Amino acid sequence: MSEAVIQTNGLTKDYGNGRGCRNITLTVRAGEAFGFLGPNGAGKSTLVKMLVGLIRPTAGQASLFGAQAGTIEARRHIGYLPELYRYQEWLTGEEVLWLHAKLCNLEHSYAKKRIAELLEEVGIGLRGRDRIKHYSKGMQQRLGFACAMISDPKLLFLDEPSSAMDPVGRHEVRQLLQKLRKQGKTIFLNSHLLEDVEVLCDRVALLNNGEIMAQGSVEEVLQEKNRWQLRVGGLTPLHLEWLRETTGLPMKIASIVSLQTGDLVWLEAQLKDDEQIGWLNSLIVEQGMTLYEVNKAKNRLDEWFVNAVSGLNHRGERA
């Protein structure tokens, strides 16, 4: 088993107004991508700020690479892209990266090479010579990504790394993160873009009102079931009831495809094993219905997230 890069035990930050986070205990191992999820105001950014040393915990402990969080030894190995990023608008992108390179005490020739590589890697390119005041929010976020990676850190803390980007930008960031994972980097990702988390992360934790509700591998939290979706024509309520009684399988109409005819639907069935799909297909055809398409369904992290917090109180942005 790989070493623990992030280790927290009972980590707590109490602001005295009900915000912050409480009793956070988790482990992130080397080379792992860990997704930290939760509604707005749940305390995700508070946790990250404690881990990178920007605020001190009220109680509990946290360590990075075995060193106490916030110490120089712990910070030496990390890169951080905050949710709220601000750069000097009178500087160029290159100059901002040079500033961060000097803060990291990088040797000049290495920094020059590294800056050129990063500007290309994050999609800024020659616009690195433009002043920040001419950058869009998405461009500034790309620059922040480059700043986080300037020292080639072992561990990256990314707080909503593509929130200001368009779909193309988010796709490029996702590809970059996948590349970093292949290089063995450890990634701690705060994001409300659950599709990115589902694709990138090995494990996730769900935070609500400052407390962890669930954590584990993506497969564990989703509790994958063997669900199939079938696009069927000619399905009536009697057909559906007959199929349920004959097979003994849970079935429901997931959506109506054609409102004009009212009988072209997506039927969703939960099977015990994949072999049953052939049997179900034959039953549908034998009863005179038309089978247009069959797909194995996959549980989605966004569905799990909504179901997990549905009906619960959460602080939100104004609480």
Image (cartoon, rainbow, N blue to C red):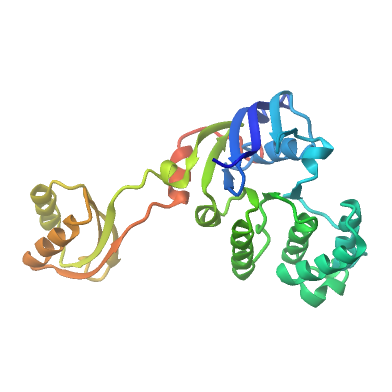
Residue positioned 19% across, 59% down in the render: 277
297 over 33 or under it: above or below: below
Quarter of the picture containing the C terminus is top right
Residue 206 against residue 303 in the figure, above or below: above
Instruction: Tell me where residue 226 appears, x and y as whole percent.
Output: 28, 51
**Horizontal side, residue 208 vs residue 223: left or right:** right
Residue located farthest toward the front when viewing the structure as drawn: 1
Q: Quadrant of the N terminus?
A: top right
Closest to the observer: 180 or 126? 180
Q: Is residue 236 left or right of residue 70?
A: left
Q: Is residue 78 above or below residue 309?
A: below
* Side of 231 where 85 appears, left or right: right
Residue 235 coordinates in the image, percent (x, y): 16, 63
Tell me if I can see residue 319 in this picture: no
Q: Quadrant of residue 119?
A: bottom right
Closer to us: 217 or 264? 217
Q: Quadrant of residue 13?
A: top right
- Residue in front for this viewpoint, 306 or 25: 25
Residue 122, located in which quarter of the rendered image? bottom right
Horizontal and vertical percent position of residue 260 = 25, 71
Q: Position of residue 116 (x, y in %)?
A: 81, 71
Q: Examine the rendering and report whether any part of residue 179 can be seen.
A: yes
Name the residue at 90% across, 65% down. Answer: 95
What count of labels does the image hold?
Answer: 0
> What residue is shown at x 81% (from left), y 75% (from top)?
127
